[in-house]
Image (tube, rainbow, N blue to C red):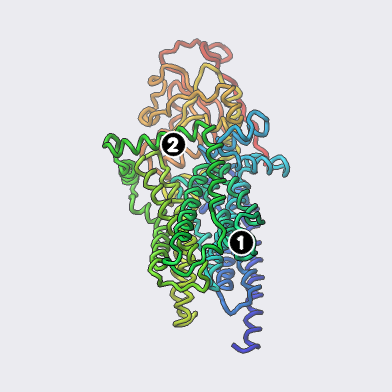
């Protein structure tokens, strides 16, 4: 390419990148000025179209320039930063659009723990994995941010770490000019987020998996420190200090992933020991030039052994897994596939299928597993020629670690303990993202050198774009994957707070598919709600009772029934009235013995008076027995 043409192309790239940043800014503003006004069933459908158009065009510009090897390193770096901005904007939609909180169930309990830390009802070392909660508390106390938003910002911090350090891991392992762009592309697929047991919400296991590439990158740098800096085997270095801090941190983010990291360290230590013993027979790699992983392994093992046994939650879970595996081996437990079969039947009842859901959630992940497996195979048969022989051994470390982590997955799968094995799949997807990106960058580079970059990109580009779209469509829970959005509205939290503050102690709460305890955690803190004795809930209301409207004859004691807008959207729109019907929701106000006490734009509270309870109405409408409170809901503020 002539000098003049190169300058002209560089100018075009600068103009395109400038336009990309402008488009990204416009998209962010379009989403920001259109905040959520109520519960949104799908973040995809509810987010303004200009946001999607602008970020898509900005993403296209950034990736085109980043993958152009004729552009200068500075321009490509700017393009990568633009791409990171696009992907962070995508993952930050709930914050940009002013969601009160994002994440039901466990996430609400984690928000409750943050409140407990804030009030002093709980200390960080009182729970098994306090790191994420402490970061959220720092956002709240130092930044003056409301705790629900602080929790959301904490989630974004972990995603930013993932987007930064997974590409750096790939760049360390590959000599290709396309290594970091492919690494960022693989990170942007967010393959660990499978929405079965790894979610885009405040969920410490998810945060620990997103933190893992940072620890791996420090591990790679730590192992090569002696060769780079000429220091002694056991002497401290800046990389070793950072690694020890990161290792301790991941334990406090979530011990389950710390245990997986320990397995990785053990694998590396064993491989190093074998190379030190049989090095002459195993190739030209000089193990003496590498810092050994023995000390980090011992450090993590000791720290894990000191911390985890103090918490019954972890030891109890470990005992359950061991017992279930023994039961499976002796043939006294259910088959591990029974749960999948039940879910498959439920999907069939709402007009979907397990095969369709697998394609939406795991097809791209499966492709990366295959690509990563190909790299592992080629590295062992010696068909990959690395310029840096040191990187070959790191690939072997990751390959053997992948096998060890797969064995742990098998243990979880055979134990059939909830969905723990899907957490392990999330971690394996992270490792596959690194290895798959290395294989893609080296493979595409080899093809481009043999044929032409234009022809290779012409074939690979559309395929990569389709994979990116497929993966992006399943990052957020939505009707596309037959799930409701985890959006928690201010009206829901305000409604629960009002209902709980004015409740009668003699009346318990019931709800559609769940109870009130999680929301109580979010509003009052977990310890605070337990002291107030507001976690006492009845079983969820049976669908046949709800649909027929015979609540007053079904219950022998008074109940509060909570109905949210999300309940209607989930049961009627997503599940196609599989259990709870639209007529059941619409007829609630007309049911005998059912009185509406609270109503706002997202929350309704009903009082169910049993038919066998004698009540004498007075002039004020009061009844004997549990007093019906006069409830009012304050208007939310933005």
Residue 49 visible:
no
Label 2: state its secondary structure: helix
Measured from the top left, where is residue 473 in percent x and y?
Answer: 47, 56
* Image-quadrant location for residue 549: top left
Label 1: state its secondary structure: helix
Measured from the top left, where is residue 24 in percent x and y?
Answer: 63, 63
Instruction: Please state which of residues 417 and 472 is positioned toward the viewer in this rendering.
Output: 417
Badge count:
2
The residue pinned by badge 2 equals: 318
The crowd level at tag 2 (other Cα within 10 Å; few <14, some 14-19, many 20+) is few
Left or right side of 267 for 66: right
- Name the residue: 46% across, 39% down: 568
591 is higher (above) or lower (below) than 451:
above
- Name the residue: 43% across, 75% down: 459
Marks 2 and 1, how far apart at CA: 36 Å
Measured from the top left, where is residue 160 in percent x and y?
Answer: 60, 55
Q: Nearer the viewer, mark 2 or mark 1?
A: 1
Determine which of the numbered discs, if any, sits on residue 225 in the image.
1
**Quadrant of the drawing holding the C terminus:** top right
Residue 76 visible:
yes
């Amino acid at each position: 390419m002539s000098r003049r043409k190169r300058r002209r192309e560089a100018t075009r790239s600068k103009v395109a990148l400038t336009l990309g940043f402008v488009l990204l800014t416009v998209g962010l503003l379009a989403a920001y000025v259109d905040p959520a006004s109520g519960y949104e069933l799908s973040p995809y459908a509810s987010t303004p179209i200009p946001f999607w158009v602008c970020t898509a065009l900005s993403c296209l510009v950034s990736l085109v320039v980043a993958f152009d090897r004729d552009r200068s390193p500075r321009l490509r770096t700017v393009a990568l930063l633009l791409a990171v901005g696009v992907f962070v904007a995508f993952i930050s939609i709930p914050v940009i659009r002013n969601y009160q909180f994002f994440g039901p169930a466990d996430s609400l309990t984690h928000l409750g723990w943050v409140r407990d830390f804030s009030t002093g009802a709980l200390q960080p070392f009182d729970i098994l994995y306090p790191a994420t909660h402490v970061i959220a508390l720092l956002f709240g106390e130092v930044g003056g941010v409301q705790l629900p938003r602080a929790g959301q910002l904490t989630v974004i911090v972990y995603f930013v770490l993932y987007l930064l350090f997974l590409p750096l891991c790939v760049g360390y392992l590959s000599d290709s000019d396309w290594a970091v762009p492919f690494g960022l592309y693989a990170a942007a697929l967010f393959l660990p987020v499978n929405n079965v047991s790894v979610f885009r919400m405040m969920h410490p296991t998810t945060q620990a998996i997103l933190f893992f590439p940072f620890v791996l990158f420090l591990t790679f740098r730590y192992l090569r420190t002696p060769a780079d800096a000429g220091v002694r085997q056991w002497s401290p270095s800046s990389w070793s200090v950072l690694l020890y801090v990161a290792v301790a941190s991941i334990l406090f983010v979530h011990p389950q992933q710390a245990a997986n990291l320990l397995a990785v360290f053990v694998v590396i230590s064993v491989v190093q020991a074998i190379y030190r013993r049989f090095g002459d027979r195993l190739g030209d790699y000089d193990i003496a030039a590498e810092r050994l992983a023995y000390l980090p392994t011992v450090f993590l093992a000791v720290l894990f052994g000191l911390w985890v046994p103090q918490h019954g939650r972890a030891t109890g879970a470990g005992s359950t897994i061991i017992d279930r595996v023994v039961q499976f081996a002796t043939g006294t437990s259910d088959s591990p596939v029974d749960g999948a079969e039940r879910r498959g039947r439920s999907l069939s009842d709402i007009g979907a299928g397990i095969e369709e859901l697998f394609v939406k959630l795991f097809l791209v992940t499966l492709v990366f597993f295959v690509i990563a497996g190909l790299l592992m195979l080629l590295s062992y048969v010696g068909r990959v020629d690395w310029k840096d022989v040191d990187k070959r051994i790191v690939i072997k470390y990751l390959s053997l670690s992948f096998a060890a982590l797969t064995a742990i997955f098998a243990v979880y799968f055979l134990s059939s303990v909830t969905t723990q094995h899907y957490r392990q799949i999330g971690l394996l997807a992270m490792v596959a993202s690194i290895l798959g990106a290395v294989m893609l960058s080296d493979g595409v580079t080899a093809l481009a050198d043999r044929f032409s970059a234009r022809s290779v990109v012409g074939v690979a580009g559309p395929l990569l774009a389709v994979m990116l779209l497929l993966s992006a469509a399943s990052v957020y829970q939505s009707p596309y994957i037959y799930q409701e959005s985890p959006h928690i509205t201010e009206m829901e939290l305000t409604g629960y707070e009002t209902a709980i503050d004015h409740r009668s102690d003699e009346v318990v709460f019931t709800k559609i598919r769940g109870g009130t305890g999680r929301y109580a955690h979010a509003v009052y803190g977990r310890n605070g709600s337990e002291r107030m004795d507001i976690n006492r809930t009845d079983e969820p209301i049976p669908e046949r009772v709800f649909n027929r409207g015979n609540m007053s004859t079904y219950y022998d004691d008074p109940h509060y029934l909570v109905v949210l807008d999300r309940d209607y959207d989930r049961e009627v729109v997503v599940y196609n009235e599989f259990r709870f019907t639209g007529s059941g929701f619409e007829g609630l106000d007309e049911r005998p013995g059912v009185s509406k006490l609270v109503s706002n734009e997202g929350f309704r509270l009903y009082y169910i008076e049993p038919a066998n309870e004698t009540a004498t109405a007075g002039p004020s409408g009061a009844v004997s027995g549990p007093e019906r409170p006069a409830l009012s809901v304050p208007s939310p503020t933005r």
